[in-house]
């Protein structure tokens, strides 16, 4: 991975900005349905939060009763996570190196937006394969990512109006988006990845896609949605190991 992707969240200003970010607006929609999805798949017990950043998703899983280990490549982000969650377990890992976890197994491997920033198919295959190896028997992996549509619409929490070039982006291309819920309004660079790309990655990594969920905003939600009620900005993949997901 080139430095533009590997180190984007090492920036102290961005880490500070993310540290106070909980579940505003469009982000709330990303997490809204996860408790029910996890209940439906019977997940409880130990969890690995891969790419935990400033610990928002780690604390979220902890609130659902999981015993969570949060791992990330960014020392700055992990410092913020530990400040917010002094009793939490966090671990700095080298980029792409999960060998410190090789003797551990988890009932749930969770990843929130981490794969938005990983550019090439081979690297994704290696990471998904390594994460699958960390699953306990009957364990599940939940991969929360940005839908391609997020980069071509306006949202309660995001803007893409300044980046019309996003519309011409293809798989593996960089796309840019501005977060509206933080003071740091520098564009975030992600990597566009399609359903077909993810399907191929999962298959090659030895994982089975058990469920795909695309949350839409509801009239009953506590927000005045912009595009969220007609277009889903997020995709939730539920994965299992092997041909039968177990």
Image: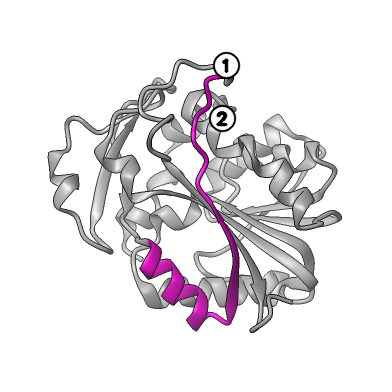
Quadrant in the picture for residue 45: bottom right
**Vertical order, 77 against 111 (above or below):** above
Q: Position of residue 172 (x, y in %)?
A: 28, 63
Q: Is residue 131 magenta?
A: no
Name the secondary structure under disc 2.
helix
In the image, is 151 to the left or to the right of 245?
Answer: left
Please name which of the two marks, 1 or 2, marks the residue nearer to the observer. Answer: 1
Q: Position of residue 66 (x, y in %)?
A: 82, 48
Residue at 13% x, 45% y is: 165
Tag 1–tag 2 contact (CB < 8 Å): yes
Residue indicated by mark 1: 222
- Residue closer to the observer: 68 or 240: 240
Q: Position of residue 12 (x, y in %)?
A: 45, 35
Q: Is residue 147 visible?
A: yes
* Mark 2 neighbour class, 10 Å CA radius: few under 14, some 14 to 19, many 20 or more: some
The numbered dot on residue 91 is none
- Residue closer to the observer: 31 or 110: 31
Residue at 41% x, 40% y is: 233
Residue at 73% x, 42% y is: 35
Magenta part of the chain = 195-219
| Figure colour scheme | one colour
Looking at the rendering, in which quadrant would you find the N terminus? bottom left
Quadrant in the picture for residue 86: top right
* Mark 1 neighbour class, 10 Å CA radius: few under 14, some 14 to 19, many 20 or more: few
**Vertical order, 71 against 121 (above or below):** above
Residue indicated by mark 2: 28
Name the secondary structure under disc 1.
loop
Separation of marks 1 and 2 at Cα, in angstroms = 10 Å
Q: Position of residue 199 (x, y in %)?
A: 45, 71
């Amino acid at each position: 991975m080139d430095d533009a992707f590997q180190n984007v969240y090492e920036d102290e200003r961005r880490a500070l900005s993310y540290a106070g970010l909980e579940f505003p607006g469009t982000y709330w929609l990303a997490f809204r349905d996860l408790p029910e999805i996890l209940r439906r798949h019977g997940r409880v017990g130990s969890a690995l939060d891969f790419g935990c950043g400033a610990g928002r998703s780690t604390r979220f899983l902890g609130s659902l009763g999981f015993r969570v280990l949060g791992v990330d490549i960014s020392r700055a982000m992990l410092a913020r996570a530990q400040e917010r969650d002094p009793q939490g377990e966090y671990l700095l890992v080298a980029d792409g190196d999960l060998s410190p976890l090789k003797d551990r197994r988890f009932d749930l491997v969770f990843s929130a937006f981490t794969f938005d920033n990983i550019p090439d198919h081979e690297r994704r295959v290696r990471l998904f394969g390594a994460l699958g190896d960390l699953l306990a028997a009957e364990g599940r992996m939940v991969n929360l990512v940005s839908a391609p549509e997020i980069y071509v619409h306006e949202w309660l929490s995001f803007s893409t109006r300044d980046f019309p070039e996003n519309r011409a982006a293809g798989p593996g291309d960089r796309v840019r988006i501005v977060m509206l819920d933080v003071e740091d309004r520098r564009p975030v660079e992600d990597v566009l990845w399609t359903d077909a790309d993810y399907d191929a990655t999962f298959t090659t990594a030895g994982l089975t896609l058990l469920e795909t969920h695309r949350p839409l905003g509801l009239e009953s939600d506590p927000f005045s949605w912009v595009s969220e009620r007609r277009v889903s900005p997020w995709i939730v993949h539920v994965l299992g190991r092997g041909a039968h997901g177990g």
